[in-house]
Amino acid sequence: MSFKIYTKTGDKGKTSLIGGTKVPKSDTRIEAYGTVDELNSYIGLVNDYMADPDTKSLLREVQDRLFTIGAALATDPEKETKLRIPDLHEADITLLEKSIDDMNEELPVMKSFILPGGHVAVSTCHIARCVCRRTERLCVAMQEQEMFIEPLILKYINRLSDYLFVLARWTGHKLGVDELPWKPRV
């Protein structure tokens, strides 16, 4: 027997956090974990363009961590839940940093700002990076509104955007696509 995807409980603009607290769908916490979901979808698209098996594997791990972050953000920190919410570890950040360092070893030194583009895989990495930065801004907004957010989440999202930037450059390099330097009109 299948279950219905629609519950009709959100038809009036409210939703429930894990723990049962009802909040408006416009709540910063909802916006933050909704943007994490959007980012996760773009990471899936980035992965679809990748050929390197190690990169594909790491991107699947990133997607898993983003589900972890989404669950943490969707949980009311004031309520005790029966669900066991997975958590992030410092090792998750270290993994991204190692990958950034490994990719940077193969890349030429960046001498100017670069324009996103040159290949759909490169552009998709940049779109994911931009959504990641929006996620970060929303998480910071939560912090500024004195909503609880695990500090490791902010650190991970920040490092993930760095990873996506370097992944865009590395992908272009592997595909033989020239970077597009920004040449400001003066």
Image (tube, rainbow, N blue to C red):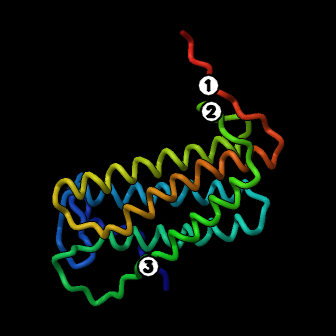
Residue 183, x across and y down, in percent: 62, 20
Q: Is residue 131 left or right of residue 124?
A: left
Name the N-terminal-most of marks 2 and 1. Answer: 2
Find the distance from the CA under tag 1 to the CA under tag 3. 51 Å
For marks 1 and 3 on the same chain, the one whose residue lies earlier in the sequence: 3
**Which of the two discs, 3 and 2, labels the residue nearer the N terminus?**
3
In the structure shown, which secondary structural element does the residue marked by tag 3 occupy?
A: loop
Question: Nearer the observer, disc 1 or disc 3?
Answer: 1
How many angstroms separate mark 2 from mark 1 (CA)? Answer: 5 Å
The residue lying at 20 percent from left, 76 percent from top is: 20
Which is in the foreground here, disc 3 or disc 2?
2
- Do the numbered discs 2 and 1 sit on residues whose CB atoms are within 8 Å? yes
Q: Residue 84 location in percent, x, y? A: 35, 88
Neighbourhood count class around disc 2 (C-alpha, 10 Å): few under 14, some 14–19, many 20 upward? few
Residue 95 % position (x, y):
58, 70
Front residue of this view, candidates 53 and 22: 53
> In this rendering, is residue 23 above or below 130?
below
Q: Which residue is mark 1?
A: 182
Give the residue pinned by disc 3: 3
In the rendered view, would you say 52 is above or below 116?
below
Callout 2 secondary element: strand
Question: Which quadrant is home to the C terminus?
Answer: top right
Q: Quadrant of residue 10?
A: bottom left
Report which quarter residue 85 is drawn in. bottom left
Please state which amino acid type lies under the numbered disc 1.
Trp
Which kind of residue does numbered mark 3 sit on? Phe
Q: Residues within 10 Å of mark 1 (few under 14, many from 20)?
A: few
Q: Check disc 2 and report the residue beneath it.
A: 114
Which residue in the rendered view is the most extreme toward the bottom? Answer: 82
